[in-house]
Structure formats: structure tokens, C-alpha cells
Image (cartoon, grey):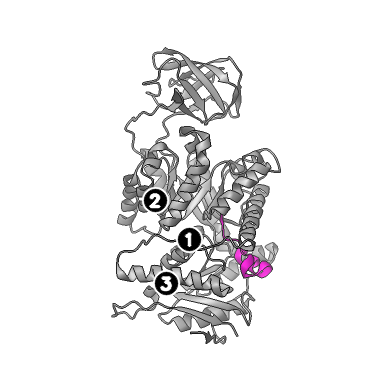
Amino acid sequence: MAASARTTSSFPYLVAASSPAAHRHGARHRIRASVGEAAMDVVSEAELREKGFMGMRKTKLVCTVGPACVEALPALARGGMGVARVNLCHGGREWHRAAMRAVRRLNEEDGFCVSLMVDTEGSQLLVADHGGATSVKAEDGSEWIFTNRRADEAHQFTMHVNFDKFSEGILVGDELVIDGGMATFEVTEKIGNDLRCKCTDPGLLLPRAKLSFWRNGKLVQRNFGLPTLSTKDWADIEFGIAEGVDCIALSFVNDANDIKQLKAYLSRRSLEHIKVFAKIESLESLKNLKDIIEASDGVMVARGDLGVQIPLEQIPAIQEWIVKLCRHLNKPVIVASQLLESMVEYPTPTRAEVADVSEAVRQYADAVMLSAESAIGAYPQKALSVLRAASERMESWSREENMQKLLPQHQLAIALPDRISEQICNCAVEMANNLAVDAIFVYTKHGHMASLLSRNRPNPPIFAFTDNANSRKSMNLYWGVIPLHIPLSNSMEDNFNKTISLMKSKGSVKPGDTVLVVSDSDLNRPCAATSVFQSIQVRLVE
């Protein structure tokens, strides 16, 4: 089955500059000149040259863009940011537009491949604001009024709640918990729709703090019948589409219908390339978890908001359950919220936070995410550096301890061609691990074969070649996948020779390397054929 790779090709390639200064000065000419050429993002290229195939990081890094990091976006991209997240809950439209266009310029001018994700605000019922710009300390025994009436100016010991009926069904003696435990109050009196409360656990009240009510140790659940996607959310989605987003993270998803509604809307607009991620952050979403995952293109484990609704000691087990189920169903999963929370203020994390990041990597989450650490923190670049270093070390340790084993996979496909693709990818990863090949090459139209390979978490990196620019961006959240954009033909042999020649020309592969090659049936099927043409090959680079 092994065959020698021809390495001669007249296909041109301009080697990406290795220094940041060279990127800035020559990038625009290089990007324009490289239309039709294989474009590996500059971060993956540098990592490959420095560490080789097995040293390449598999876990993807997501950074939330905020006031603290806009100027540092190029440094964050060089530091490994694969997805830039813009949270539409905060900031105004012009700021969002400027941030999103800054991310796009990184890709167009500096040779990066950073995907753009936006978060909808969702129908967040209970958000309280004290009217100040910074945090306010609630002292033990202090009395506060929680009201839905907006005053002209902020008053001490008053919190404005964003929903008229927030106090319906609440009883004197119930607990009011701020941000999952930052501070706790006891309801002492109901005054119309207002609540008078006494602080029982002192703490900080942040702007736009989230509220939950508890009675006898259980969350007080109420259904106000609000839609998951508000009028503002639909306007934000239109704005994101106009600005060229790659992913939409849907907040406060309750069931699969929320996802299906948005995906149907995108389909009617011929925008299927925009991926829809479900944020798991409520009890309702946990009850309908499997259906939500199956309907979505991916999932974000929003542990901060989830921790407002469930006891904190349940979070670790629920996170692992969600990550395993996503892998089971072949959907990328992002572990988010408070990974390095102390780095919002301090230049080094706690050791417990590093252990938290490492555990998410050990569970084979596709991506880990910075929230406030990069958006408003004092040390966004350092936080990303810690996230990257912790991810790389845990991956290395897993390989050294031979922990990277194939897990039994649930059959996803029903139709025979899809079942063939699934089995080919399962077998390909087993072969790649057993033969200790240096890399996996997959040629794919829409990224599906790359996702099936990624699902099995192979030891070698997966280089996914596609001729679809949108597919390249969508693969940015697949574990262990390095997506490249290149014109492809129906001939697997031509595709392989072309890509090997290009990879050799920039020193990414060398004689003696072994590459396992997988082809997508969409690329290797004659136009009039209905049969599936797929194969696994092991090729030696000469």
C-alpha cells in the first residue's frame, strides 16, 4: 500500500516571513500573491518548524476581545489565539465593528487564520446593576433594595434588576445569590415588586451581576416565557452576518428548537457556513443536552452562568459529562469561564487554575477559552501564554504516559456512504497511532472528514486541505486540526504531490517522514458516479 511521493511541482509558493516585523512589512503583498497557494497560518507554521509534528499543540485557544486587548490583538494571534470571541452583551455597535474588523485585518494582512465568533445576549432574566463603573462591596448585615425601577442616578444600597417580574414567586426568607456566590442576601421584606434584603455573606457586587434565588438549598425555578432569541439578538445576528462572522454562540439555549430556528434562518439565507454553537448555562439546557448537542455545530460549557443555577460542587462532573458527550456525537466543545480568573488582576495564576486548565485538556476538550482574563484583564497576553503552556504540557504528558488511546466510538452515520467515511477515519487514526506516522493529511471539501479524524484524538497532527475558505475557518475549533486553503482536484495523487511539494518547499516535511493520507469522497468521485471513492494510504516522503 505504501508508495513513494513525487516531489517535483511547478506550483509556486512564497514562504511566509518568520519575524513579526517581516509579517508587517511584507504581509499584504504575500497574501495577495498567494491566491491559489497553500496557506498555512503563520502560528502553525512557526510551531511546526520549532517543535516538529509531535510537538504541535492540539487544543485550540479562544480569546474574548475587550478593551484590555484590542491593541494587543496581533500579539494574541502570534500567541496562539485561533478564535476571537466578541461578546455582544458588552460595548456598543461601533466598538464591536472596530474589534471585528481588526480581527479580519490580522487574517488579510498578516497571514493569520483567526475565526470570528460572536455571543448573543439572550434573555438573561435576572441581571442587577448598582449603577457604578466598578465593583461595590456589600458588607455583612447591610440592607439593600432590589428594584426594577430605574432611578435617574445611582443610590447607595440599591440594585436595579432588568426584569419587571423578577420578584414574582419569591418569598420572605429566600436566599438571593449574586454571581453564583460572590455575595448572598436574605429576603427580609417584599415592597410591591421590590425586595428588601440583608447581606448574609459579604462580597463584591460587579456591574451587571447575575441573580438567582434559592429556597431550602434548591434553585427557585420560574418560567417567564421569554424567547431565547430576543429582538436585540436578531439585530445582533444581522450585524454579525454583515461583518463576516464565522460562528454564533447562542446564549441561554433551553432546547434544540432554539438552535434549529437559527440554523433554519441561516440556511434560508444560504449562510450554512456560519456555525451555531450552543452555550450550556442553565438547568433547562442540561435536561435537553443530547438533543441540543445533536442540533448544534458545537457547544460552549459556560461554567460561570451554569454555576449560578447549580451547586458549585456539581460543575466538574457536569463539565466532563458534556465534553464526553460532545466527542461521542462528534461536535467540538469549548470549556469556558474563569479558567484563569485571578489573572484579571494578577500577573500569575493560582496553581489550582493551572490544574483546572490541564483537566480540561486531559478530557480532550477541543478548545479552552479566556473570558474576562483577555477582555478586561490587566495581563491578557500573559494569560494566553499560561493557557498555551498548560495545554502543551498536558498534551505532552499524555503522549509520554501513553494515555492517548482510542475510545469506543458511537456510530453516527446511517447512510452507507457516511458509515464508510466514519469507519475509514476510525481505522485511519488507529493505523496512524500504531505505525507512529508523523502526520495525517486529509483532503476535504466541507471539513467533515477532518472532524471524524479529530473525534478520535490521534497522536499525530491532522493537516486538513480544503479549497473552501469558509470550511477552513470552521475547522479552527477542531482538536488537532491545522486547516489549509489550497485548490484541489478530483485526483488524490495530484493533491498529494502538490501538497507534499509545497510542504517540502517551506521545510514543513522532510525526506523520511511518513504521512497517512485520507481522501474525502466528495473530492474523488467522478461527476456521474454514485460509488464512494475513499482510501487510506501511507506515504513515505522522499
Q: Secondary structure at mark 2?
A: helix
Residue 216 falls in image quadrant: top left
Mark on residue 307? none
- The residue labelled by disc 2 is 293
- Mark nearest the camera among 3 and 2 is 3
Side (left or right) of 357 relative to 123: right
The numbered mark, 1 or 2, whose residue comes first in the sequence reads 2
Rendering coords of residue 107 (x, y %): 55, 61
Q: What whole-number distance in Å separates the C-alpha atoms at marks 3 and 2?
A: 24 Å
Looking at the picture, tell me which residue is in the foreground, 153 or 422. Answer: 422
Which of pointers 3 and 2 lies earlier in the amino acid sequence?
2
Does 408 sit left or right of 382 as displayed? left
Range of magenta residues? 43-62
Question: What amino acid is labelled 3 in the image?
Answer: Ile
* Front in this rendered view, residue 186 or 197: 186
Disc 3 target residue: 424
On the question of residue 35 being in view, the answer is: no
**Depicted 239 relative to depicted 458: above or below:** above
Which SS class for mark 3? helix
Mark 1 to mark 2 CA distance (whole Å): 19 Å
Q: Nearer the viewer, mark 3 or mark 1?
A: 1
| Residue 274: image location, x then y, percent | 41, 56
**Circle 1 or circle 2, nearest the eye:** 1
Residue pointed to by mark 1: 407
Q: Label 2 amino acid?
A: Ile
Q: Residues within 10 Å of mark 1 (few under 14, many from 20)?
A: few
Q: Quadrant of residue 423?
A: bottom left
Residue drawn at 65 percent across, 47 percent down: 383
Identified by mark 1, the residue type is: Leu
Question: Which corner quadrant of the image does residue 350 belong to?
Answer: top right
Tell me if residue 343 is in the magenta stretch.
no
